[in-house]
Amino acid sequence: AKKIILDTDPGIDDVMAILFAEAHPEIELKAITTIYGNVTIEGATHNALYLKQKYQLEADVSQGASKPIVRPPVGPTVVVHGESGFGDVEVPAEVEGEADARPAYQYIIDAVKAEPKEITLVAIGPLTNLALALQAEPEIVNLVKEVVIMGGAFGVNDHRGNVTPYAEANIHDDPHAADIVFSASWPVVIIGLDVTEQSFFTGDYLDKLRDDAGEVGQFIWDVSRFYLKFYKEKVGLDACHVHDPSAIAYVIDPELFTLREGPVRVVTDGPAEGMTIQKFDGRTYLHDEWEKHTPQRVGVAVKDAELLEIYRQSI
Ligand code: BDR
Ligand code: CA
């Protein structure tokens, strides 16, 4: 099985991703590291510990950063994920178990040192923890197997931002961290809106999951009610996009995605703050800073029907 550390801000589609990773035999979910984003950092850790208890997850939980590296915090996205982060579903105030004593960035450093080239970091929230880990121990670039990120939007098929016209939420929450993570010399795969907005969980699909997939299917159905309402009212869709589970799907079967290679940068301020851009032509420009940056891979197409089928069969 492929060992992953899942860095997450649970979050409705984060729950969908966590339960997918846990269910699929190809993945060993070693740890859940938490990050602010959809909810506060305390909320994110609480939700992770709740899932650990509810589904007897073996994964460690480690609490991450409470705020971005440079920019002021954006704040939780209550309209998308609800007060608790799980839509209308209430999370009990008391949960068993405790987070690891180390902060997430340190947990990540220790884990990849203990098992060099064995662990894939999968980040489905703002990238602060990964950037802090790189700053504290630059050597991890050689110790991680791969870094898979849900975030960004590159304008493929007209997919641009979802929180501003040009920025996707996870990158917009901490653009400086994202630029550090994409510029580092480690292998990054970016699963952004260009592909996640090509796959849809429709009401019918989620109903079927509830009917066929036991308690886990029911729970995913329950948390998705609020999300579907948001999509209907604010996005004008009768379905929700498959953001965070798509990053897990990439780890399970990279062949589901077509990737484009080239260095990736992030706009860190101004009207396009949080915009992700990639240089993918072979040209040499007069003022070309890009050459110094590691080529990374960006998802530009997805076999959406296959992805949905793998998800359905795993849960
Ligand atoms: C991303 O933002 C969050 O709301 C979701 O959980 C996902 O990680 C999509 O832009
Ligand atoms: Ca997320």
Image (tube, rainbow, N blue to C red):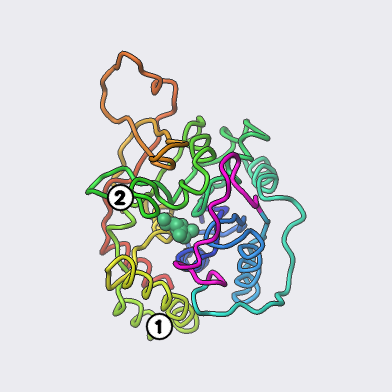
In which quarter of the view is residue 45 placed? bottom right
Foreground pick, 123 / 172: 172
Could you tell whether 292 is left or right of 44 in the image? left
Is the residue under label 1 in contact with that under label 2 (CB below 8 Å)? no
Residue 252 visible at all: no
Locate residue 303, reporting x and y percent. Answer: 26, 57
> Which quadrant of the structure image shows residue 32?
bottom right
Q: Counting other residues with Cα less than 10 Å from the Cα at mark 1, is it few (<14), some (14-19), or many (20 or more)?
A: some
Q: Nearer the viewer, residue 9 or 2?
A: 9
Ligand 1 within 8 A of label 1's CB? no
Q: Horizontally, is 126 left or right of 33 in the view?
A: left
- Name the residue type under label 2: Asp
**Is 39 drawn above or below residue 263 in the view shown?**
below
Distance from disc 2 to disc 1, alpha carbons, whole Å, reads 28 Å
Q: Which residues are magenta?
A: 64-85
The structure residue drawn at horizontal position 49% and vertical position 43%, both measured from the top left corner, is: 147
Q: Earlier in the sequence, mark 2 or mark 1?
A: 2
Secondary structure type for disc 1: helix
- Residue sitting at the far right: 101
Residue 69 seen in this snapshot: yes
Residue topped by disc 1: 210
Q: Farthest residue toward the bottom?
A: 211
Question: In this figure, which residue is indicated by the disc labeled 2?
Answer: 194
> Magenta stretch: residue 289 in it?
no
Left or right: 23, with 205 as reference point: right
Name the residue at 57% across, 53% down.
5
Identity of the residue drawn at 61% across and 77% down: 91
Name the main secondary structure of what is drawn in magenta.
loop
**SS of the residue at dot 2?**
helix
Question: The disc labelled 1 sits on which kind of residue?
Answer: Arg
